[in-house]
Image (cartoon, coloured by chain):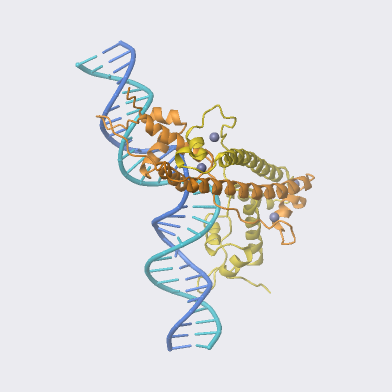
Chain colours: A orange, B yellow, C blue, D cyan
DNA sequence: CTAACACCTACAGTAGCTGTAGGTTCAAGG
DNA sequence: CCTTGAACCTACAGCTACTGTAGGTGTTAG
C-alpha cells in the first residue's frame, strides 16, 4: 500500500533531475522525507504530488518564492483564494510584459536582418545598427521585469 | 582633443553601471584602458563606442558570447558578412521561439485565472490546475532555448 | 586642509538549477 | 556468498550576466 519511491523514481515521475529534488528539499520547498535504513530518501505519494505541483508551476514560469507562497496558501483551504489569484495574475502580467518586450526586440531584429543584403562586413547593416542605435529609434529597449524560468 | 572619460562618465554615457564596465573588461569584452597616474581607468571615444555596441546588443538579447563573436567579426571589415547575419538570425529565431513559448504560457495562465470565481482556496481553480496538470492538456510546456538577457 | 565623492581591488550573492568528486547502498547474477 | 554495476549519499563548484559590499585610495571643491 504505502508505496514509497526512491529519488530516482520520483524524479522520473516528476520529469526532473534527481539533483533538482534534493535542491528543493535543501531550500525548504519539499519536506525532508523519511529515509531507508541505508539513509536513502523514500518519497510518499503526497510528496510526489507536491513535487508535481512545483514542477507545473515552474513550467508556467512562477518563481520559487511565488510557489512557496502558493504551497503555504494551499495548506489553508478555508481561506479566501484572493491571495492565490493575485499571485497568478501577477505571473500573467509578468508574462504579458515579457511578451511585449520580446515583440519589440523581434521587430528590431527583423528590421536589422532584413536590411542586410549580404556583402562585406564593413557594409553590413547588422553591425551598423548595433553600433549606431540612437534615441531617434522608436524603440528604446525598456527593461522588462524579472525572469520567467526556463527549465 | 583626446577627451578621455573616467569610468563613471563612461557608465553614464553607456547607460550601465560602473561595475558592469569593469566586468566586461575582466571577461575580455573591453580592452584594458590606460590608467591615470592615480591608477584610474581613462576611456577613449573608441572604447565608449565599443561599450555602446555591447550594451545595444545586450538590449536586443544577444548573449555575451555572440557579442564577442560580433565584435571580432567587426574587426575584419573585408570578410563577407554571412557569419554576422547568422548570429543575428539565430538571435531572431531565439526571440521568436521565446515568444511562442510565452504565448502558450499566457494562454494557460489566462484560462487558469479566468476560471477562478473567488471562493475558498479549497475550490480555487488556480491551485487545482497547478495540482492536476496531466498530459491530456494540449500544451505540454515545451522547454524554450537559452535566456534572453533582462538587464 | 578637509569633506565628500569617485575610484580601486577582491569577493560574495542573485535564480534555479546542473555537474562533479569521492564515497555508500542496493539488487541481481554467478 | 560474493561481486559488479547502477543508484544513492554529501558537499561543493559552475552556469549567465551582472550587482552589491567591504575596505581602502585618489580627486576635487570650498
Ligand atoms: Zn550583413
Ligand atoms: Zn535598438
Ligand atoms: Zn481562486
Ligand atoms: Zn500546464
**Vertical order, C13 against B46 (above or below):** above
Query: In terms of image quadrants, where is residue D4?
Result: top left
Front-most of residues B112 and B144: B112
Q: Position of residue B108 (x, y in %)?
A: 58, 38
Which of B136 and A125 lies nearest the eye of the viewer?
A: B136
Horizontal side of A35 relative to D1 (left or right) equals right
- Asked whether, in this view, residue B45 is left or right of residue A148, the answer is right
What residue is drawn where x is 78% and y is 48%?
A: A115
Q: Is residue B150 above or below residue A24?
A: below
Looking at the picture, does residue B36 appear above or below residue C13?
below
* Residue A73: % across, % down: 43, 44
Report whether A142 appears left or right of A71. Answer: right
Residue A31, image quadrant: top left
Q: Residue furthest right?
A: A117
Which is nearer the eye, B50 or A14? A14
Q: Residue at x 40, y 30 (%)?
A: A10
Q: Residue sitting at 75 percent across and 52 percent down? A: A122
Q: Residue at x 27, y 30 (%)?
A: A36
Split into 4 quadrants, where in the image is the N terminus of chain A? top left
Q: How many marks?
A: 0
| Percent x, y of residue B33 | 57, 64
**Residue A56 x %, y %:** 50, 36
Amino acid at each position: 500500500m504505502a508505496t514509497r519511491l526512491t529519488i530516482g523514481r520520483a524524479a522520473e515521475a516528476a520529469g526532473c533531475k534527481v539533483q533538482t529534488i534534493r535542491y528543493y528539499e535543501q531550500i525548504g520547498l519539499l519536506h525532508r522525507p523519511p529515509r531507508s535504513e541505508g539513509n536513502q530518501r523514500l518519497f510518499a505519494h503526497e510528496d510526489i504530488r507536491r513535487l508535481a505541483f512545483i514542477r507545473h508551476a515552474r513550467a508556467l514560469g512562477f518563481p520559487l518564492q511565488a510557489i512557496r507562497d502558493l504551497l503555504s496558501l494551499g495548506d489553508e483551504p478555508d481561506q479566501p483564494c484572493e491571495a492565490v489569484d493575485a499571485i497568478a495574475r501577477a505571473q500573467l502580467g509578468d508574462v504579458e510584459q515579457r511578451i511585449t518586450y520580446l515583440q519589440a526586440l523581434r521587430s528590431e531584429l527583423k528590421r536589422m536582418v532584413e536590411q542586410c543584403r549580404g556583402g562585406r562586413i564593413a557594409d553590413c547593416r547588422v553591425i551598423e545598427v548595433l553600433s549606431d542605435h540612437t534615441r531617434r529609434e522608436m524603440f528604446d529597449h525598456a527593461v522588462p521585469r524579472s525572469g520567467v524560468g526556463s527549465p
